[in-house]
């Protein structure tokens, strides 16, 4: 009964225009983009991510523990014309899904103009929600092509501690409610750490989100990186497995979409950067492997365009291949020495404003990530299992060096495309 209840909730609570945009982009656009990505990699070896993440500025109204963004430095922002150029180029190569990050994206003065100029694309906005007024939520509903993903890090006390503000939770909930009242497809994200796992990794918390009208939730795990590494907040391996077990169980029990980015349908760990399904553009335009790897050899402002820049980048390619050879988890956490080696080998530059990224890597101690061999927890719900099997898996990157791998067997691409088409139908 979980799926019918979820569909029923969405049909009743999401504005029809927003619902049409969601259905088209996730039901048709995203699968087609992923299939094009798979064909491109296997036929040409070129990798261009079907989900492109862009930090459109560094400024933020909060000061969260462990944040790796230069929120306290002078503002850096990607201009509207530059953003349009990036998105138009990506769209010409089959991509229509973009994650907008910051800092706080709603501090960018041209955010809504950007959404309006790309009505056939879909945007996920990572936000603390505090700047989403009733007026902005109404404008988002009129545009229909964006889903706010509102970050909640704990109860009143924990939120203030984690996010460096006063009355943080209530101000965030006001923004969340504005989104829900205006019929936006709305999610809640949580960076799980030692101070919030016991309160927010619970069925009662998810039921509260459902009662409020939230449509999906995304559990990240805290990454101790950046200028203020808070290693004491990091989850231990047992807690990481607990997160995975909880997500799998709740997916089969509650009418709420639960997103994760670290596992395939069999429960095998993966890294979206290593698979090539996502890369990141920083507020300075630097083309980075992922948001927490703040080094770059190329810029999105390169005249070649973002497609050529990414597909021709030896730095990105070497990063993906090196990560895939050494772990199915997070190379930054497990092997900071390899990150340092890759940066030196390619002469990559520190893409931060603070210019302390290499010193931060030097100070890191290796620690476990989501890769726990022998402790895999497979998906239970058939929808997640099917979707991940075809559209969110490792795409063979961890076995590509094996010529006998089933992922690389003759006809594998064609079979994947045919099966994916049948799944969408």
Image: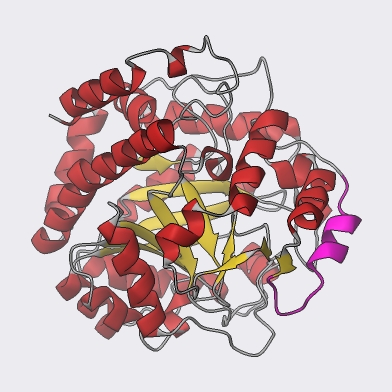
Side of 411 relative to 160 (left or right): left
The quarter of the picture where residue 71 lies is bottom right
Taking the spot 29% from the left edge, 45% from the top edge, the residue there is: 33
Residue 366 appears anywhere in the view? yes
**Residue situated in front as seen by the camera: 225 or 408:** 408
Q: Residue 407 at x, y = what percent?
A: 45, 18
Count of numbered tags: 0
Side of 155 relative to 50 (left or right): right
Residue 152 appears anywhere in the view? no
**Residue situated in front as seen by the camera: 191 or 160:** 191
Q: Residue 282 at x, y = what percent?
A: 56, 70
Q: Residue 81 at x, y = what percent?
A: 36, 83
Whether 405 is drawn above or below 42: the answer is above
The quarter of the picture where residue 411 lies is top left
Residue that extends furthest to the left in the rendered view of this protein? 16
Q: Is residue 18 magenta?
A: no
The quadrant the C terminus occupies is top left
> Which residues lie in the magenta part?
351-365
Side of 56 relative to 239 (left or right): left
Colouring: secondary structure
The quadrant the N terminus occupies is top left
Taking the spot 69% from the left edge, 51% from the top edge, the residue there is: 223
Taking the spot 47% from the left edge, 37% from the top edge, the residue there is: 45
Q: Is residue 362 magenta?
A: yes
The quarter of the picture where residue 65 lies is bottom right
Side of 261 relative to 381 (left or right): right
Q: Residue 347 at x, y = what percent?
A: 76, 61
Taking the spot 46% from the left edge, 42% from the top edge, the residue there is: 204
């Amino acid at each position: 009964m979980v799926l019918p209840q979820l569909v029923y909730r969405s049909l009743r609570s999401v504005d029809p225009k927003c619902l049409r945009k969601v259905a088209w982009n996730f039901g048709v656009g995203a699968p087609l983009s992923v299939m094009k990505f798979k064909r491109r990699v296997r036929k040409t070896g070129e990798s261009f991510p079907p989900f492109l993440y862009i930090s459109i500025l560094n400024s933020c109204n909060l000061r969260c523990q462990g944040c790796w963004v230069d929120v306290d430095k002078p503002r850096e922002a990607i201009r509207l014309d530059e953003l349009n150029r990036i998105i138009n180029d990506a769209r010409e190569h089959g991509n229509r899904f973009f994650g907008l990050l910051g800092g706080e994206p709603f501090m960018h003065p041209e955010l809504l103009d950007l959404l309006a100029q790309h009505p056939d694309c879909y945007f996920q906005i990572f936000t603390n929600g505090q700047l989403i007024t009733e007026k902005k939520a109404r404008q988002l509903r009129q545009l229909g092509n964006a889903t706010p993903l509102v970050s909640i890090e704990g109860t009143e006390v924990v939120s203030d501690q984690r996010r460096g503000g006063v009355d943080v939770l209530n101000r965030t909930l006001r923004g969340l409610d504005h989104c829900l009242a205006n019929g936006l497809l709305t999610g809640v994200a949580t960076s799980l750490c030692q101070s919030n796992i016991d309160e927010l990794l619970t069925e009662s918390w998810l039921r509260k989100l459902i009662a409020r009208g939230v449509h999906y939730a995304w559990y990240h795990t805290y990454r101790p990186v950046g200028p203020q590494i808070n290693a004491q907040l990091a989850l231990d391996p047992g807690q990481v497995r607990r997160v995975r077990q909880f997500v799998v169980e709740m997916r089969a029990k509650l009418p709420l979409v639960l997103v994760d980015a670290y596992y395939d349908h069999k429960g095998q760990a993966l890294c979206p950067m290593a698979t090539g399904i996502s890369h990141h553009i920083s507020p300075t335009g630097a083309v980075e492997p992922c948001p927490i790897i703040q080094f770059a050899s190329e810029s999105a402002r390169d005249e070649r365009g973002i497609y050529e820049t990414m597909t021709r980048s030896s730095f990105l390619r070497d990063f993906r291949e090196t990560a895939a050879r050494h772990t199915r988890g997070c190379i930054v956490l497990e092997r900071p020495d390899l990150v340092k080696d890759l940066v030196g080998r390619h002469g990559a530059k520190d893409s931060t404003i603070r210019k302390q990224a290499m010193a931060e890597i030097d100070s890191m101690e290796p620690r476990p990530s989501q890769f726990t061999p022998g402790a895999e927890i497979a998906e239970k719900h058939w929808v997640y299992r099917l979707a991940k099997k075809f559209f969110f898996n490792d795409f063979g990157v961890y076995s590509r060096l094996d010529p006998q791998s089933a992922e690389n067997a003759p006809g594998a691409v064609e079979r994947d495309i045919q099966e994916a088409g049948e799944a969408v139908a």
